Image (spheres, rainbow, N blue to C red):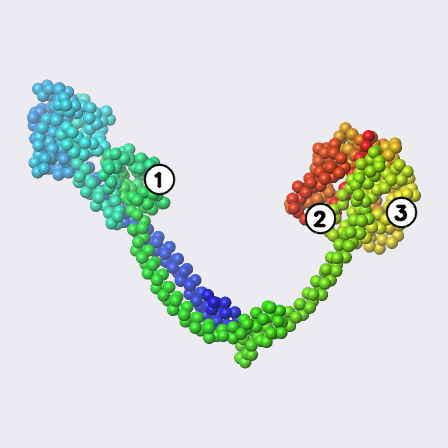
Amino acid sequence: MKWIKKIQYSFSAKLSFYVLLSTITIFLISFLFFSVFTGRTIRDSAHGKAKNLLAITQYKIENVFTSIKTVHNNFQWAIIDRGIEADSLFSLTRDILESNPYIFGCAVAFEPHYFEEKGYYFSPFSSRQGEEIETIQLGTEQYDYFSMEWYAAPKRLNSPYWTDPYYDEGGGQMLMTTFSTPLYDREGAFIGVLTADVSLDWLTDLVNEVKPYPSSYSVLLAHNGTYIIHPRKEYIMHESIFSVAERFGIDALKEAGTRMTNGESGMAELENTSVDDYIKSYIYYTALPSNGWSLGMVTHKKEIFWELRKTRIITLLFFLIGLLFLYVLCRGIVHKLSKPLSDFSHSAREIARGNFHAELPHIKSKDEMMELKNSFSFMQQELVNYTRELKETTSKKERIESELHIAREIQMGMIPKIFPPFPDRNDLDLFALLRPAKEVGGDLYDFFIDNDRLYFAIGDVSDKGVPASLFMAVTRSLFRSVATHYDDPAQIVLSMNNSIAETNDANMFVTLFIGILNLSTGTLSYCNAGHNPPVLITPEGKVSFMKVKPNMAVGLFDGFPYQFETMTIEKGSTLFLYTDGLTEAENREQALYHETRLIQELENAASQSPRELIHTIVESVNRHVNGAEQSDDLTILAIHYIK
């Protein structure tokens, strides 16, 4: 919104904006609290309503099933009495139907030849045929009831038994379930069963009445999860809750089916399913203790929360209308109060283009606008001053950078950098590298040949930057001027130390390793002045640090008695000299490169030439630091005494 860009320093304008923003914030917080609290209340109410309906329906069903059990208990005595006539059982079954409207059919089925005069099968059976009751003898060769579940199961289990729903083609001619009670004579021997066939029509009507919401529906599961009652007719007795869950990949439905078939009561929540019957639904379920079936009710969430959703929409609509009115009102107020700001905006653009003397609006009122004008005026003056100082600073910085660049070129020009340095000699190969941490640094190396002797040095000044570079230049010049006058490297170091210490007011120092290699005999004389010990690589590839005496660094005290050492190196050996910028190179975690890694890398590259060897070590260091900023100068000198 363009008008918001004008709201800057006016208290009145800011107040209008914050009123609008606060109104939105308070509403959103209140709306969120209302939605969450109301949603929980509606959900808990729906859960309670569903559980109550299930409990009532369970009570009604159990009442019917219990009454059927009671009928069986009441009529068992008449059947067990051995003196009863067989034909009187037909009227007994009829009496049971007449006094119990929920029972569709009733049979008393006996063991083979229980009544000798009735033959192998004898099962008086009465069933409802419309308004009439028909009585027949059920057992025949075509209808061998001994193999039927309603007969075989209670005989095997020695207890009353509810069958899963089945289609009885023998007598019931419809989908029903049968309650069978085993009968025993006075000696306890099994003689048959008393049955009560219950039509599922009344049960279906009763279950379908359980609808807390218009789109809710109920299901009834058998012991194994098979649908006994379901709004989809094709599911009844052909699908189970597990087969549906497996087909559509609904794990929550499978878990609910497991709990239902285990006789539990509770609630399951389904989310993001692809089946219309179960999409974002609650499943409430309870067990039927009489026969182990489970009654379930499915209610869609969108229907439970529809009233809440409708209330939210209406509330948001009214809020948007009110917000629009408040926006128009605030915009008018802000536009009136922020008019001077447009003038300041024009002046600010002129200042941004570089016109630091742009005219500011004339303000008469002594309020925020006057304070703003004073601030702009102060800013103009500060920008003028800052621009002038920035130009001066930039000029100085460019001059310093130019001078540093020249100093770097001078410093790099002081050390040997043409390799191979002695192309006419076939007994020596040498390569060196110096990489300062800043524009200029304090590391140095140098070498030259005099009378078939190689003089070489490597050093590290105690500081960095320009002071260290000057100290390095002095040190390198002294080495060149002093070395040719002595055959003893200790005398070279002593002379350099006395010269530097005499005028070293800055208390700087340099660590040095100076050596003289007789190229004819292989004799190496050297003096170490506080420097890192070099590494010797033998012709056989053995890598080890040279043993050196711990002399003091150069430049601290004059007159220190430096000692030199000698050794003979074999042709084919390589001397590897370096500064601590190599072994103390740090990565981003401040882990050092370390001497151990240096030895490992040198062992792997022992057969390489000095140039290859140094490049290999530098690449290894680069991998270790992994882009971290270089913290110290890095210098390496490799000397190969050729066979």
**Residue depicted at x 77% and y 52%:** 408
Q: Position of residue 453 (x, y in %)?
A: 88, 37
| Residue 431 in view here | yes
- Circle 3 residue: 481
Quadrant housing residue 535: top right
Q: Secondary structure at mark 1?
A: loop
Q: Nearer the viewer, mark 2 or mark 3?
A: 3
Where is the C terminus found, in terms of image quarters? top right
Please indicate whether residue 204 sits to the left or right of residue 426 in the image: left
- Quadrant in the rendering for residue 347: bottom right
* Amino acid type, callout 3: Ser
| Mark number displayed over residue 631 | 2
418 or 233, nearer to the observer: 418
Q: Is residue 28 left or right of residue 124?
A: right
> What amino acid is found at the position of numbered circle 2 in the picture?
Ser
Relative to 369, residue 317 above or below: above
Say if residue 52 shows up in the picture: no
Residue lying at 14% horizontally and 35% vertically, measured from the top left: 104
Q: In terms of sequence position, does the residue under pointer 1 or pointer 2 come before the other? A: 1
Q: Position of residue 1 (x, y in %)?
A: 46, 65
Q: CA distance from mark 2 to mark 3?
A: 31 Å
**Residue designated by label 1:** 250
The extreme bottom residue here reads 364
